[in-house]
Amino acid sequence: MNWLIITIALVSAQGGFIYGLDTGIIATTFGHDSFRIKMYGGPFINPVLSGAIVSCYNAGQAVGGMSTGFLADKFSRKYTILIACILTIIGSVLQCAATGVGMMIAGRAVAGIGCGQLLPVVPTYLAETAPPSRRGFLVGLQGMMIAIGFGVANWIGYAGAFAQGDAQWRIPLAMQLPLPLMLSVLVFWLPFSPRWLVMQGRHEEAKAVLLKLHHDKDNVAASDDLVEQEIVQVREQIALEREIMGGLNWFAALRLMFSRQYIRRVFTATLIISWSQLSGSAVIQNFQTIFYGIIGFTGRSALLISGIYGMMGIIGQIIYLWVVADKWPRARTLWSGSAVLCSLLVICMALSAVYGKPGSSQDGARAAVASIFIYSASFAIWFNALVWVVPTEILPLFMRSKGLAFAMTFKAVFSIILSQITPIALTSIGWKFYAVFVAINLAGGLFFFFCLPETGGKSLEEIAELFGDGLATEHLGESAISGEASAEQHEIALSGEEKRIPSKV
């Protein structure tokens, strides 16, 4: 990787930080008495209104997710990031200026639309600019920034406890503004995705971008050959996809998403992305102050615990980037991670059942909190990044942005359901509610073990073969793939004179 690729990845991955901060800040906001007095009319917990505030944010994500596929293909990946940043800025202003629960809900909904666009478009952009051997690391940067966003949100909320009156929650909510403002400016510096440029017929621009991304000052000839091969492969893959659809129009792609040939990939991508909700991680993050109250920690103590909880995700994400990314097999990581999360939730439930009663040992309550901390770190190691890496790999180019948008919409639907019932369930049945996520993690582990093929280290076009599609560059022969294709072979490929009919599932 050269410094340009790393810089592009770090800049665009700030979208993950925006999502993490915007999503995580509401957990500590609920913990301030001044917020509850302003919104609920008293310092009490209102499960219905709390659920509504979180649900409307997730509903906004659903709307944003549904719009991303069209925007990313029509206006480019990078300008979709700009649109999302503008929406999160508007939503943040509404939240920190809220005079009542209605304005707060509206602000959360608008910010949710922006975050719903950022979540699928950033990994799409990263996957399409990353070299295959480092795609897990670079796309995983979004997961890293999400974890950092969560962690920073928790500490911002804790710091707010030292302010007075409404400033306790208005200042933390205003902290959502600086990063999208900065990214709105930096996005103009980012190059267009080379695969998006090829889809638009702008082949010379795509080649220029790839030359910058793959430039190797020590071996210029090798990097030039790599670019030539990649351009051929991408152009031929798009040509094959045009054959399948009779063109690359947006509605044809939507129809094919649910065809026999592609439904498996769309379903798998949707399930994996939805895992950030179904595994229980988001529920614990958003309503952790309620859980801490159940086992005896309230007020500033609960906010301090939230801050420490956020740091565990960052530690886990660092372990992922340096130990797991592009080193562990993708499928094995997901099913083994499901087993780990399932075990930790069982431990948390057992400790909460015994020590979650008034007058119980504080040591037991602290052990329950410790199990939640380990859960946060484990989710970051096994899932937080991979739930974005694998879906971007398994979806073909022509439906990548649309498929991720569809998956993001389903994730938001699950979020709406869980965010509405979780505060009510936690106040009614407490720790027993986590049994739902034990069962879900067990089922998910079985699915990943038996149904998910290994995609690590393969090009985005080669992964299509794992699901029964034809590989466009096969007709070049083994020499083309190994970098020994002649100029004449490249010219034939670029002119589209040779075609290979995709295999059918």
Image (spheres, helix red, strand yellow):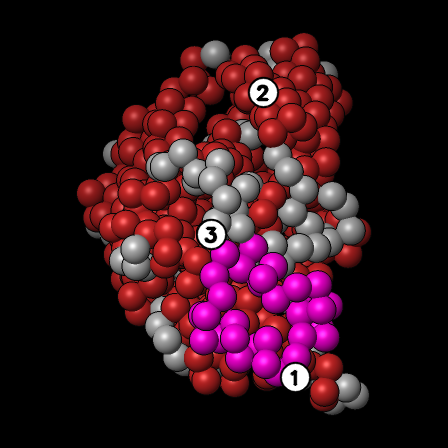
From mark 1 to mark 3, how far is it between C-alphas?
29 Å
Pointer 2 or 1: first along the chain: 1
For residue 179: magenta?
no
Q: Main secondary structure of the magenta part?
A: helix
Magenta segment boundaries in residue numbering: 471-500
Check disc 2: other Cα within 10 Å, few if <14, some if 14-19, many if 20+. some
Q: Which residue is mark 2?
A: 443
Residue 372 visible in the current orientation: no
Q: Quadrant of the N terminus?
A: bottom right
Q: Quadrant of residue 35?
A: top left
Q: For mark 1, give the secondary structure.
A: helix
Q: Is residue 48 left or right of residue 394?
A: left
User: Mark 3: few, some, or many residues within 10 Å (few <14, many ≥20)?
Assistant: few
**Kind of residue at disc 1:** Asp
Residue 238: x, y in percent? 43, 62
Residue drawn 63% across the image and 11% down it: 353
What number is the disc on residue 501?
3
Label 1 crowd bin: few (<14), some (14–19), many (20+), radius 10 Å: some
